[in-house]
């Protein structure tokens, strides 16, 4: 049993911390939101008065925060209070440069560190089926592995510091582009009088097959577990997809990479978000696609 500190108990972090408790670990948690702390307490975690207090005596510290600036701020606050030889893991989705800066901060204080953003959404967080994309040296990854395995089903060591974040933003750029494509195909099929099921039966076993279609189909019916069958309740909110696409575009600009479809996907999701749909699952982008037909 490990002594784990968990900072950031939102829609993802809360269930992840709960799974660590279920696995038998001692979890001390902290969040700024009272309701999140109360939920974590009911899930069996101890609640600290501050982030710095949460990490005292911990073998492993995990953060799950909104943006790079929050990660740097929290790591700056807690690392001086961490036990010598402890490991710090960030599971947030942030920009690559902030991830590298966080690693450098940990190294300066002699701490092992891993950036380990996740894929799988709130369902994966609750079901402990997340995929972790990890960046850091071999020794740090080996130390993080037994902890992360309590919260996910797949761990990939992507490379050195920041590589996990790089993999996450590239993956989600693919996901956004493909979901828009699937939405356009179903929108066109509707205009042509083709049923949702007919298109699904063909495309899911043909060259149009992709995860956005077979696991997260954006229309009700063909995939019963997709958010389309539950009013597009997330899941993975469109506002978060905008965040990830923006991170991808910032990284592409910094690296000198051409990502024209990624840029267009960002513009489409930003328009959907601006229309008041930031809390809608990202697969709900088909609604935006349909609305464009009347313009």
Image (tube, rainbow, N blue to C red):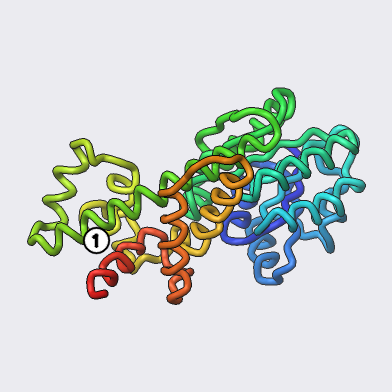
Residue under the point 65% across and 48% down: 95
**Residue for point 22% across, 54% down:** 185
Label 1: how many Cα within 10 Å (few below 14, some 14–19, many 20+): some
Question: Which residue sits at x=55%, y=38%?
Answer: 167
Task: Tell me the residue at 86%/32% (across/down).
Answer: 85
Closer to us: 7 or 19: 7
Q: Secondary structure at mark 1?
A: loop
Which residue in the structure is indicated by mark 1? 220
x then y, percent, for residue 22: 61, 46
Seen as rendered, the residue at the extreme left is 193
Q: Image check: 272 left or right of 288? A: right
Q: Quadrant of the N terminus?
A: top right
- Seen as rendered, the residue at the extreme top is 138
Residue 98, image x, y percentages: 72, 47
Q: In this image, 23 relative to 270: left or right?
A: right
Foreground residue, 2 or 90?
Answer: 90
């Amino acid at each position: 049993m490990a002594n784990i500190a968990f900072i950031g108990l939102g829609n993802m972090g809360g269930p992840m911390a709960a799974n660590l408790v279920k696995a038998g670990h001692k979890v001390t948690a902290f969040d700024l939101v009272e309701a999140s702390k109360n939920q974590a307490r009911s899930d069996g975690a101890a609640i600290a008065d501050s982030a710095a207090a949460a990490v005292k005596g911990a073998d492993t510290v995990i953060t799950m925060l909104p943006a790079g600036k929050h990660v740097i701020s929290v790591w700056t606050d807690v690392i001086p209070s961490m036990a010598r030889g402890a490991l710090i893991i960030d599971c947030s989705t942030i920009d690559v440069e902030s991830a590298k800066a966080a690693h450098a901060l940990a190294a300066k204080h002699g701490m092992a560190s891993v950036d380990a953003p996740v894929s799988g959404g709130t369902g994966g967080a609750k079901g402990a089926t997340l995929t972790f994309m990890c960046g850091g040296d071999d020794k740090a990854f080996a130390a993080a592995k037994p902890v992360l395995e309590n919260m996910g089903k797949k761990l990939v060591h992507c490379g050195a510091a920041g590589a996990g974040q790089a993999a996450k933003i590239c993956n989600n750029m693919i996901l956004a582009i493909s979901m828009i494509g699937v939405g356009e195909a179903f929108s066109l099929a509707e205009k042509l009088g083709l049923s949702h099921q007919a298109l699904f039966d063909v495309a899911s076993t043909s060259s149009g097959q992709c995860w956005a279609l077979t696991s997260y189909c954006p229309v009700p019916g063909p995939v019963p577990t997709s958010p389309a069958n539950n009013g597009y309740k997330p899941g993975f909110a469109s506002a978060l997809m905008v965040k990830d696409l923006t991170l991808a575009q910032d990284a592409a600009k910094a690296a000198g990479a051409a990502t024209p479809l990624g840029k267009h996907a960002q513009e489409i999701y930003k328009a959907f978000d601006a229309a008041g749909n930031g809390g809608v699952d990202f697969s709900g982008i088909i609604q935006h696609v349909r609305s464009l037909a009347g313009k």
